[in-house]
Image (spheres, rainbow, N blue to C red):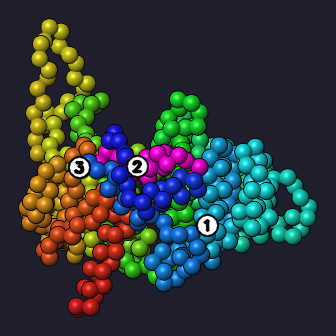
Amino acid sequence: MATITVRNLDEQTKQAIRERAARNGHSMEEEARLLLGAGALADNPERVLTSIVNMAEPEATVENYAPGSQHYFPARGKTVLLIICGGIAAYKSLDLIRRLKERDVEVNVVMTRAAGEFITPLSAGALSHSKVFTDLFDRQDEHDIGHIRLAREADLIVVAPATANMIAKISHGFADDLASAILLASKNQILLAPAMNPAMWNNPATRRNVEALLKDGVQFIGPETGEMAERSEAGRGRMTEPMDIVGEIGRLLDDRPKPLAGLSVVLTAGPTHEPIDPVRYIANRSSGKQGYAIADALAAAGAEVNLVSGPVELARPAGINFFQVESARQMHQAVKNCLPVDIAVMVAAVADWRVANSADEKIKKKPGSTGPVPLKLTENPDILKFIGHHEQRPKLVIGFAAETRDVIKNAKAKLKRKGADWILANDVSPETGIMGGDSNTIKLLSSSGVDEWPNLAKDQVARRLVDKIIAYFDSEIISV
Ligand code: C5P
């Protein structure tokens, strides 16, 4: 990892990091590292950090999130019922309350008995400016408001952290405490932010419960991959950071008109796996994060999204049609099945070649043989090119170009060759940290030239692209 010299940052950036670090209880160095994420691998982490901090949150005043402001928060004025379960991540829920209040969201809080082992109702109440309901049965509370009313009055119920135990209870319809009774009585949208040990998250019982809840339309955010609170434990199980949960709440409660309603999209994401034999395959480092973020943003704008995904470690986005594939040929077929559509966004890192002579049985080492088994490769179908020249070509065809050098030159050639309207080119050389990382630096090429975007988080890239798509279809309508 490159080193960051805080001394080299300008005063404004230093001050912004100092304030964020103090708010989040981190050292400045920790805060800078967290902010940078994969960007720390960039050539000039100080520059990346400066751009992240300067486009980060505005000052936390309710006015900053008001209608008409650049940072308008779509859940402003809505009511969120926050259920806090017992887990070390419960402390982050206090920050979540604060962030929502800053954005003028009414927050009612319910704490499970176990949550009380980690944080107090007093601190949650002080931040939410309202009474905190706990699992201790209180005749007065039940008389005054009642768990059914608590459930009904909320525009959204958020469970953060959602423990494995609570997930199991909801998926089976238990109602043996206030929190689970509310969840069972609720007809509202539910958003779960799980937090647990990776072994618990990966346990087949939790997998089954999550799968069942997804089918029931329950929304999930996270968990994220990283270090656990327990020493030397790492994996998928960390609760998503409060600001990301705030973003998701905004998206879920956004009832503004959907500018892409009525338009359909086919979108590819992730890598492809090309079998060598039944147990081995050729793959690449694509995480699928960028494609999934675009799928989410398109769905939030009201488009009907068909996501054709290669194998990735990401939660299946809610509210879209999902097609799981492994190989390029399967991806090609799935994309064909989705036609006709209005928009194609080909984000997948499709393997250019597959093994021509892939074996039906596991290939064994031959006793006495010296060299490896030769693999004969053959070209895969180019899905973007296929779509770009199809008789049912979508109105807007968008591709990506992952390059390690001559980014613009190569992307220009690709635009033409593949019949795309736009190509989003990015430099994926290992030092950029883009492959598998959380941010991206895009150059958007179209017939009208090159638009260079700053280094942005992948979900911001997604939103910016969707804004462009919206503008494209707006101008289409005008020109008719
Ligand atoms: O040729 P290259 O792989 O660099 O092109 C990248 C673009 O083409 C991406 O949009 C990718 O999803 C798409 N592509 C495809 N099918 C392939 C190879 C690439 O759809 N076989």
Alpha carbon separation for disc pair 1 and 3: 36 Å
Q: Label 2: which residue?
A: 6
**25 is within the stretch colored magenta:** yes
From this view, report whether residue 234 is shown above or below residue 210. Answer: above
Three-letter amino acid code of the residue under disc 3: Val
Counting other residues with Cα less than 10 Å from the Cα at mark 3, is it few (<14), some (14-19), or many (20 or more)?
some
Q: Which mark is residue 100?
A: 1
Q: Where is residue 278 drawn, in percent x and y?
A: 28, 31
Question: Would residue 217 be visible to someone looking at this image?
Answer: no
308 in the magenta segment:
no
- Vertical order, 71 against 173 (above or below): below
Q: Secondary structure at mark 3?
A: loop
- Residue 231 x %, y %: 57, 30
Q: List x then y, in percent, for residue 57.
A: 48, 66
- Dot 1 alpha-carbon crowd within 10 angstroms: few under 14, some 14 to 19, many 20 or more: many
**Front residue of 234 and 254:** 234
| Earlier residue among tags 2 and 3 | 2
Residue displayed at 10% across by 41% down: 378
